[in-house]
Image (cartoon, helix red, strand yellow):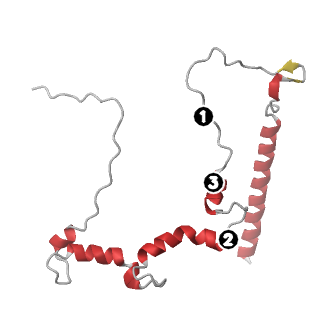
Amino acid sequence: MNRIVLGAVFALLLAGAGLFWWQGRAATESGAPPPSLAGGEAVGDEPLPFAHANGLRGAAPPEADPLTREQKRFDRLDHDRDGRITANEMLAPRANAFRKLDLDRNNLLTFQEWAVRTSNRFSGADGNRDGALTREEFATTKPKPGKQPVCRCSPVPRPTARG
């Protein structure tokens, strides 16, 4: 019984907090400036400011890309551009990866084919071909460190030791 009462109280508190948040957001939006009109048309009594870029120097700002990230992602999969993604279109990028793994080209992927990269790595590290890796052989499988980005910042003077 206590759980039901506590749940109801918590739900009312949550609803009240949402109501206060919604009211605060509405008050903020009502105090926002009016939307700007093209061409400097007057809103109310005052005309909108209009800037001329004749005397400005420097690089032009980049053009705004009208497509959102989701639209771009959708368009990458929609090959026939019909506004729909079929199952074949959805699976097409994965088909190339599957073909690389399917070594015998029978469209069936066995565990050995799936694990080919690990198997090849093991075979390459097993120098004496005994089917087991020693510590020295295992050390050769260590992943290579990624390239560190080159710092293009100005050099920082280092303190010198005075002696």
Residue matched to label 1: 62
Considering only vertical position in the picture, is 48 above or below 80?
above
Q: Amino acid at mark 1?
A: Pro
**Residues at marks 2 and 3, CA–CA distance in whole angstroms:** 17 Å
Residue matched to label 3: 72
Res. 86 mark: 2
Image label count = 3
- Front tag of 2 and 1: 2
Residue at image location 60% in from the left, 30% down from the top: 61
Dot 3 lies on which element? helix
Closer-to-camera residue (7/100): 100
Dot 1 lies on which element? loop
Q: Percent from the top left, x then y, of residue 92?
A: 57, 69
- Looking at the figure, which quarter contains the C terminus? top left
How many residues crowd around disc 3 within 10 Å: few (fewer than 14), some, or many (20 or more)? few
Q: Amino acid at mark 2?
A: Thr
Q: Taking 154 as reference, is 6 left or right? A: right
Considering only vertical position in the picture, is 95 above or below 147?
below
Residue at image location 81% in from the left, 24% down from the top: 39
